[in-house]
Image (cartoon, coloured by chain):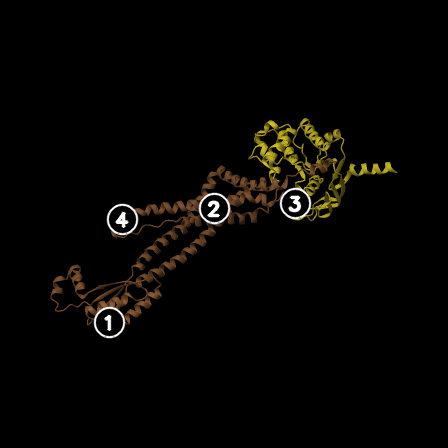
Chain colours: A yellow, B brown
Amino acid sequence: MIEFHNVTKRYDGGFEALSNVSLQLDDGQMAFITGHSGAGKSTLLKIIALIEKPTRGQALLNKINLNNLARHRIPYIRRNIGIIFQDHQLLFDRPVFDNVALPLHIQGFRPQEIAKRTRAALDKVGLLKKEKSLPITLSGGEQQRVGIARAVVHKPMLLLADEPTGNLDPVLSREIMQIFVDFNQVGVTVLVASHDLDLIDVLDKPRITLNGGQLILNDLADSKQEDRDGWQ
Amino acid sequence: MAGSNIRRVKPAASNRVSAYLLHHFKSLLFSLGKIYQAPTTTIMTVAVIGITLSLPGGFYLFLKNVDAIAGDFRSSSQIGLYLDLEISEKQARALEKQIAGMANVVSTRFISRELSLEEFRQNSGFGKSIDTLSSNPLPHTIIVEPAEADTFTVRNLLNSLQAMPEVEIAKMDTEWLERLYTIIEIAKRSVIIITVLFAFAVLLIIGNTIRLDIQNRYQEIIVTKLIGATDAFIRRPFLYGGVWYGLLGGIISWLIVEIGYLAISGPLERLNLLYQSDMSLITFSFHDFIILITSSTLLGLTGSWIAVARHLNQIEPT
């Protein structure tokens, strides 16, 4: 699903957010990206979400090279990805239902289909009764669940989450993470950036740890290594 | 595997076409809804566009009226032929017949010397002094009404009439009319210049309004881009917004001009009465109305297109 080959990202001004990062996340896998703030977690996700381009190296999503993608193709690639933000990025001028339905509108689904899928997504995050509420009236945890419903409503093959539990208390954080685990169990590839190490320990999923833009721990590679060792 | 199954869930092609049309319709309504939600801004923008367009609109209508009045004068322009005093009435009547048969002549009227004198006696107030004259100083007169044609043809007719031996003087009282036409021509070109300038102003007004609109919806644009909206999808509501501004502005300008003309129609009718004229005020025809509305709508679309092209591409998620 995701392949990074020696990816380096240097921002204008010389700051190197990622240095020579190589990794591979297969279809249907779930992994966490950890590290201190400024370690390069967000930059890694931004490269996958086509928000940033690698300065050097190669990033592939489903064998598609993300380095030099034509501008008009970007929206269609993004439709395969569901993105969840720490600050939810909800639109406060419209009710929950319209927020969640937005990806379906963009992709040109019919109204009946939109209603069906939107309600299904809201049901999955337990907010079916709030569909007419304005986001501003919801709690932080509920807003994040609306964000998740919007990210999954069009059934993307990849879910990216950037500090999805950043502002939530431990109980809510656990609930949110469980939603990601549930999606992963039905076959969605999930990549979550988080520094909530206690929570990550509980979930027992592979970990990619960054420090100062460098990959210092990669469970994905290690597990492969183990497989290979087992073969021998 | 499950991942690849998920990928296949896409709307069917036929559904996409109708959903596409539906989206167009929705953007149209959505942009109207936005206008409804921000009435003050919209009313101000639309009013500015309306007032701006009402100037060239009003000038155009004014010219149309002046043109009609001048046309009225032109159709009533006549050539007066004052014959040689030696010509007898019989000869004069024969000449009238001959002229009546000429090309570009609609009708002729013969006024004999005696009749002229009688009219003069009654109308001029010099009746007594005329009686003291030993002979009638007035010639036989033929009034020729030329066919409605361009100035050149009428002038040719005048020249050929002047060349007749029986005609002492051929006179056409239209030089002032030609001056009027020249003035109208200048005014017409001024209206074109004004229209171009004001159309440009409307472009700027709409472009600026849409630019502010884009800034206000910055967050929405970022989010929709991140969830896979194409540029066309994001552009659409703004373009429709421009269309609404243009359309409503056009209607406002039409109303302003109509109300303005209504306001001056009272005194104008009195003027008509005083001049015993049956001129009625010309307002916008249906054709004019359609042209006004269409061009203001197109201006709206163009203005928003320029704003969108300039500002929308600069907004990218970071």
Q: Are marks 2 and 4 in contact (CB under 8 Å)?
A: no
Q: Look at the picture and state if B216 lies above or below B145.
A: above
Q: Are marks 4 and 1 in contact (CB under 8 Å)?
A: no
User: What's the amino acid at mark 1?
Assistant: Glu
Task: Determine which residue is flagged by label 3.
Answer: A74
Which disc is residue B166 wearing? 1
Q: Nearer the viewer's eye, disc 4 or disc 1?
A: 1
Chain of the residue displaying label 1: B
Quadrant containing the N terminus of chain B in the rendered view: top right
Task: Determine which residue is flagged by label 2.
Answer: B246
Q: Which residue is at a point 34% across and 45% down the rendered structure image?
A: B262
Q: Are marks 4 and 1 on the same chain?
A: yes
Of the residues under marks 4 and 1, which one precedes in the sequence?
Answer: 1
Which disc is residue B270 wearing? 4
Q: Nearer the viewer's eye, disc 2 or disc 1?
A: 1
Q: Secondary structure at mark 1?
A: loop
Pointer 2 local density, CA inside 10 Å: few below 14, some 14–19, many at least 20:
many
Q: Residue furthest bottom?
A: B165
Kindly tell me whether residue A218 is visible in this rendering: no
The x, y position of residue B77, in whole percent, is 29, 61
Pointer 1 local density, CA inside 10 Å: few below 14, some 14–19, many at least 20:
some
Chain of the residue displaying label 4: B
Q: Are marks 3 and 2 on the same chain?
A: no
Quadrant containing the C terminus of chain B in the rendered view: top right
Q: Look at the picture and state if B95 lies above or below B250.
A: below
Alpha carbons under labels 2 and 4: distance apart: 37 Å
Q: Secondary structure at mark 4?
A: helix
User: What's the amino acid at mark 3?
Assistant: Ile
Alpha carbons under labels 4 and 3: distance apart: 70 Å
Pointer 3 local density, CA inside 10 Å: few below 14, some 14–19, many at least 20:
some
Chain of the residue displaying label 2: B
The x, y position of residue A220, in whole percent, is 78, 37
